[in-house]
Image (cartoon, rainbow, N blue to C red):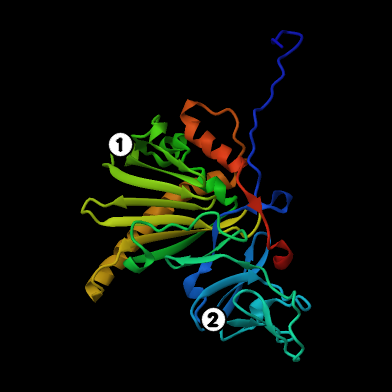
Amino acid sequence: MAETKDAPAVRTRVRHPVPREGEGGLYTQSWFPVCRSDEVPPGTVIGRPFLGGRIIVWRGMDSIARVAGAYGLHVGADLSVGTVHGNDVRCPFHHWEYGPDGRCTRTGIGDPPPARARLFTYPVCEKYGLIFAFNGEEPLFELPDLDFTTEETVWQISEMPMRIDPWMFCANVPDFQHFIPVHKTLRDDIGHYDRIQWNQYGLSFAFTAYPNLGRGGKIPFRVAVHGTSLIYVQTALPDGTWVGTFAAMTLPGPGETNCYIVVCLRKGDGSPETRAAEEQLLQSLTERFIAMAAEDQDLLSNCHYVPGTLTRQDEALARYMHMLRNWPRANPGADFIC
């Protein structure tokens, strides 16, 4: 209806929401880091929040990390205060033991293990100093490497708690409009939607960045989003040094995450001099990436993130949001973590 003196136009806000994590008890099916590798040496078990509940992470004498629901199937004791025996985790209350596949292998009193006594276990992958769990019975996609694998790299890990769902941080990658006002960075890919390569569970592309609005030189980047919780960035320094970094976001519950920022370098000869130089460079690069992430942190934490009236330059963001609206969601371990 046209606006007149007697009848002002009705104003409505365009909204195309993405389901929030935990909505209807469901969470996106993606790889989420649950802890650092060095927090779980062989023979230990720890507890962590996950998907609105609690899980355990343990490492047996075979050095393999495993993740399962935290609560025992006898009377619900918290297994994170239990102990590891061989490759099994033992309940602290009645000494029921659970094997690598979650099955009860023995009871403390000697009764036969109940046939249905089996914890929910999550698919696990360990890379670059982090232990990841997949929200599902089986992974929908593999957790990729950077150009160089864990064995070929040295790395430094930092943490940044955020009050957001992880996908909101991932959405910064195809949100080209925010780079100039927030990061003061020009890019050569603005308006070049055709550069982006899409797959069923993510996207990737290359671009050249010009920091400080073009006054800070140029930096070539390759960036990728994997799932709803992982951002990979790779570049080369002026001397040719390869740098790989990624943001890997936990999902303890709705509207919260702890972002692990991992910076990697290709491993040198291992000498004390080389190692000292690597540590110095890792620290410097980590500070840069944390500073960039901090520029987004307050904005996202206070944002009611609901896509609305997008423009032509939001074509990539719109497609990623469409992907998120249709993302597979589940919580198969819900009965075992709450």
The earlier-in-sequence mark between 1 and 2 is 2
Which amino acid, by three-letter code, is at mark 1?
Gly
Q: Position of residue 307 (x, y in %)?
A: 59, 35
At label 2, counting other C-alpha atoms closer than 10 Å, the crowd grade (few under 14, some 14-19, many 20 or more) is many
Q: Tell me the distance, in whole angstroms, between the alpha carbons under discs 1 and 2.
A: 52 Å
Residue at image coords 35%, 46%: 222
Q: Is residue 178 shown left or right of residue 11?
A: left
Q: Is residue 27 shown left or right of residue 41?
A: right
Check if mark 1's residue and mark 2's residue have beta carbons within 8 Å: no
Q: Position of residue 273 (x, y in %)?
A: 22, 72
Q: Is residue 53 shown left or right of residue 297?
A: right
Residue 255 makes an appearance in the image: no
Residue furthest to the right in view is 75
At label 1, counting other C-alpha atoms closer than 10 Å, the crowd grade (few under 14, some 14-19, many 20 or more) is few
Q: Position of residue 220 (x, y in %)?
A: 30, 44
Depth check, front residue: 295 or 14: 14
Depth check, front residue: 185 or 58: 58
From the image, state whether disc 1 or disc 2 is nearer to you. 2
Q: Is residue 173 shown left or right of residue 23?
A: left
Q: Position of residue 25 (x, y in %)?
A: 72, 53
Which of the labelled discs sits on residue 264, or is there none?
Answer: none
Against 293, residue 43 (above or below) is: below
Residue that carries the numbered disc 1 in the rendered image: 214
Against 171, residue 85 (above or below) is: below
Mark 2 element type: loop
Mark 1 element type: helix
Which amino acid, by three-letter code, is at mark 2?
Gly
Which of the labelled discs sits on residue 60, or is there none?
Answer: 2
User: Residue 127 occupies which quadrant of the picture?
Assistant: bottom left
Depth check, front residue: 213 or 141: 141
